[in-house]
Image (cartoon, grey):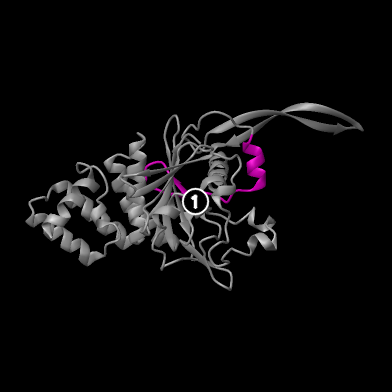
Amino acid sequence: MGASVRPSFSEGLGGEQGWPEALRGRGPQAVSGILTALRRAGLWSPRRQLLLATWQALSRALGTMDAESLLLSLELASGSGQGLSPDRRASLLTSLPLVKRDYRYDRVLFWGRILGLVADYYIAQGLSEDQLAPRKTLYSLNCMEWSLLPPATEEMMAQTSVVKGRFMGDPSHEYEHTELQKINEGGKVFEEEVVVQIKEETRLVSIIDQIDKAVAIIPRGALFKTPFGPIHVNRTFEGLSLSEAKKLSSYFHFREPVQLKNKTLLEKADLDPSLDFMDSLEHDIPKGSWSIQMERGNALVVLRSLLWPGLTFFHAPRTKNCGYIYVGTG
C-alpha cells in the first residue's frame, strides 16, 4: 500500500504545495488508511498533517465535494499569482461552516475575491435546496466577518453602469456621477446638472450578479431537475468522461436558462429535460470567449473566461470534483 500511495501523494502535492490527489473522492476510512500508509512509508510531515486536518474539517462542515472544490479552486488561484495567505485560508476554514449553520444554507460556496485599492472583497454564496433558486451573496474584508448583500435589481444595474475604474475596498465609499435631469417649472422644461451618489456596496452587488449570469458554470449532469420543478444536486453524478470534458457543450451556465426558452420543439427533441434544462456554453456570444485546457496530464480540465478575465472553472474528469472561482478587479 505504501508503494501505491507514494507517487500519487508526491505528484498531487507538487512538493507539498498543492492539493493531494490521493484524497480526492475518498471517505473518512480511506483517508485514515492513506494517513497510516504515509507514516509507514516515511512520507509524513507537519504540512501533510495540516492538509489532512484541513480536508477532514472542511468535509465534515461543507460536504466532501464542496471542501475539495474550495481547496482546489484556491490552489488554481495561487497558480495565477492571486492565492490566499495561510491565515486567510484558515479564516475561511473556520467561518464558512458557521455561515452555513447560521443562515441554514444547504451549501456554501466560496465565490472568489474582488481586488480593491485599499482592501479586497472576499465573496461567498449560500444555496438553498433548490440549486437554481436565487443565491444569497455575502462579502467579507477579513474572511471572518460576513455581511449579507441585498439582491440585485434592474435599478442597481442601471445606476452602477456609469461607474468606471477600480473598486476601493470600502463598502461605504460613494462614487459621484453628474447627470443631466429634465426639470419642469412653470410649464418650461430645462436641463439641470445633478450629482448622484452611488455606494460601492451597490456596485459590488451589480458586478457579482453580472459575473454570475455571464460565466458561472456547472458540468452537465451535476444537477438534475425533478418532475415537480426544483433543481437538486445529482448524487449519482460521477463526473464527465475525458472526451466529454473537452467539449464546451458539456458545460452549462449556472443560472436560469435564457436561450433554451427560444429553442424550437424540434431543437429540444434530443434534450433530456431532467439534465438539459440550462443554457450550454457552446452557444455563447461572442464565439471564442472561453479557453479550455487539459492540465496535470489530462487529470484536470480548466476553463477560463476571456469575457471576464479572472474567472476559472475546473473539473476532474470521472470524479464529482468541480467548481469555479473569480479573482479579479471586477
Q: Residue furthest bottom?
A: 228
> Going by the image, does 96 lie left or right of 158?
left
Q: Which residues are magenta?
A: 137-161
Residue 17 belongs to the span the image colors magenta: no
Q: Secondary structure at mark 1?
A: strand
Q: How many marks?
A: 1
Residue in the image at 20% along x and 44% along y: 16
Sort mark 1 into few (<14), some (14-19) or many (20+) by Cα contacts within 10 Å: many
| Residue 158 x, y percent position in the rendering | 67, 40
Residue 153 belongs to the span the image colors magenta: yes
Residue in the image at 11% along x and 57% along y: 2
| Residue 119 x, y percent position in the rendering | 42, 34
Q: Residue furthest front?
A: 243
Vertical position of residue 239 compared to residue 203: above or below: below
Identity, as a three-letter code, of the amino acid under mark 1: Ile
> Going by the image, does 27 lie left or right of 286?
left
Q: What quarter of the picture does the N terminus occupy?
A: bottom left
Where residue 178 sits, quadrant-wise, is: top right
Residue 152, visible in the rendered structure: yes
| Residue 308 x, y percent position in the rendering | 51, 38
Residue in the image at 49% along x and 54% along y: 250
The residue labelled by disc 1 is: 217
> Going by the image, does 224 lie left or right of 300?
right
